[in-house]
Amino acid sequence: MRSANEWSEDRHVALEKELDAHVTACWKEAVKYGTLSEGPTLDPATMFEDVYKHMPPHLARQREELRALRATQPKNGSPEQKNLDEQARSVAKEG
């Protein structure tokens, strides 16, 4: 395109800046909805909602199993959770 005078270095630099700004703005908007490592996060139990008009029995059982399991887990930010996180990091470092 440059050889046909359809493109120039100035246009290239301008477009690159414009695209960088656009990607940055889109990224900032996206992270408002959360990331894999930071909130806000959805309650995992919501995966059972709005899927079927009438929930099949096997999914109802799985939902109850999840609720029971989550009831035994420490709350996020609690001392117990922080201790578990530290233990997990220690095990991960050991490989």
Image (cartoon, rainbow, N blue to C red):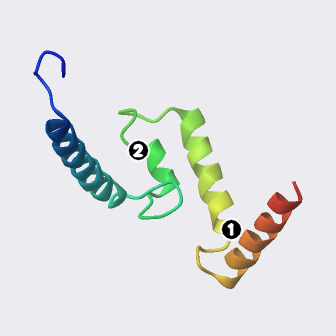
Q: Closest to the observer: 43 or 57?
A: 43
Q: Looking at numbered disc 2 in the image, what kind of residue is underneath it?
A: Glu
Q: Looking at numbered disc 1 in the image, what kind of residue is underneath it?
A: Gln
Q: Closest to the observer: 2 or 47?
A: 2
Point 81% across, 70% down: residue: 87
- Name the image quarter holding residue 50: top left
Locate residue 18, reporting x and y percent: 18, 47
10 Å crowding of disc 2: few (<14), some (14-19), many (20+): few
Q: Closest to the observer: 63 or 1?
A: 1
64 left or right of 55 in image: right
Name the element at disc 2. Answer: loop
Q: How many marks?
A: 2
Residue for badge 2: 49
Quadrant containing the C terminus in the rendered view? bottom right
Q: Which residue appears farthest toward the left when viewing the image?
A: 5
Point 61% across, 43% down: residue: 62
Name the element at disc 1. Answer: loop
Say above or below: 30 vs 47. Answer: below
Q: Which residue appears farthest toward the top when viewing the image?
A: 4
**For marks 1 and 2 on the same chain, the one whose residue lies earlier in the sequence:** 2
Q: Which residue appears farthest toward the right when viewing the image?
A: 94
Residue for badge 1: 73
Quadrant containing the N terminus in the rendered view? top left
Say above or below: 30 vs 19. Answer: below
